[in-house]
Amino acid sequence: MSFYERHREFVEEVVRTAPDGVRVEWSGDTLVMQAAPSSIHQLNLGLVQRQFERHAPDGYMLSGNSALTTPDVTKERTPDLTYLPIPSLARGGNTVPAEEALVAVEVVPPSDAGNDWVDKLRDYAVMHVPLYLIVDPREGTVTLFSEPNHDRYHVRHDRKFGDGMRVPEPFGFELDLSGLVRYPG
């Protein structure tokens, strides 16, 4: 029995009572709560989102608040940005089977980089999300993972802010990284 199944009422109460701007996710037996992102986080996400939007396949739509879940409900992750089939979004609710997502995009916060670089990297691979893009304003890098199999991705491409990065089909475009901004310090 999964964490969610054992603690369904508790998790639903935490989600219901969390303050605005606080995201609640779980992976196995770990509950993760994160505060609202910074303006640099939002700027970088917006710059990436605009480019993905121009290349989104027909029948798919941007979502920034849909929780991706596994069939056994042992994991639920809410990427900063994903693209989902329009019929999935039209079903209502705030969860979608992870295998329906085309990509998960995360912008690393100034603290707790391990959530994006370790936990979500493993979870999105387990969830069979085909592309995982990490924008890291701490390091000034962008990394694209693809070809998930079990608990890891088999292909990794790294670029620095200012470069370009090829995003494969079904998007098929060159992601311009020149406008991305590093965190101060």
Image (cartoon, rainbow, N blue to C red):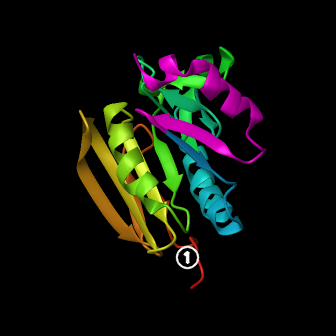
Vertical relation: 133 (above or below) 77:
below
Q: Name above or below for residue 47 compared with residue 86.
A: below
Front residue (pair 14, 183): 14
- What residue is disc 1 on? 182
Q: Which residues are magenta?
A: 1-30
- Front residue (pair 111, 172): 111
Residue at 45% from the left image edge and 52% from the top image edge:
115
Can residue 8 be seen here? Answer: yes
Q: Is residue 161 above or below residue 28?
A: below
Q: Could you say where residue 89 lies in the image, as x and y percent from the top left? A: 64, 22
Q: 10 Å neighbourhood of mark 1: few (<14), some, or many (≥20)?
A: some
- Is residue 169 part of the magenta span, yes or no? no
Q: Nearer the viewer, residue 157 or 111?
A: 111
Question: Which picture quadrant has residue 74?
Answer: top left
**Extreme residue toward the bottom, this view:** 185
Choose between 59 and 111: the one closer to the eye. 111
Quadrant housing residue 73: top left
| Quarter the N terminus occupies | top left
As displayed, is residue 23 above or below residue 112? above
Q: Is residue 2 covered in magenta?
A: yes
Give residue 183's position: percent from left, percent from top. Answer: 58, 76
Task: Please identify the quarter of the rendering in which residue 172 is found.
Answer: top left
> In this orientation, does residue 86 appear?
no
The residue at 69%/17% (across/down) is 92
In which quadrant of the rendered image does the C terminus lie? Answer: bottom right
Callout 1: SS: loop
Q: Where is residue 38 drawn, in percent x and y?
A: 68, 64
Q: Amino acid at mark 1?
A: Arg
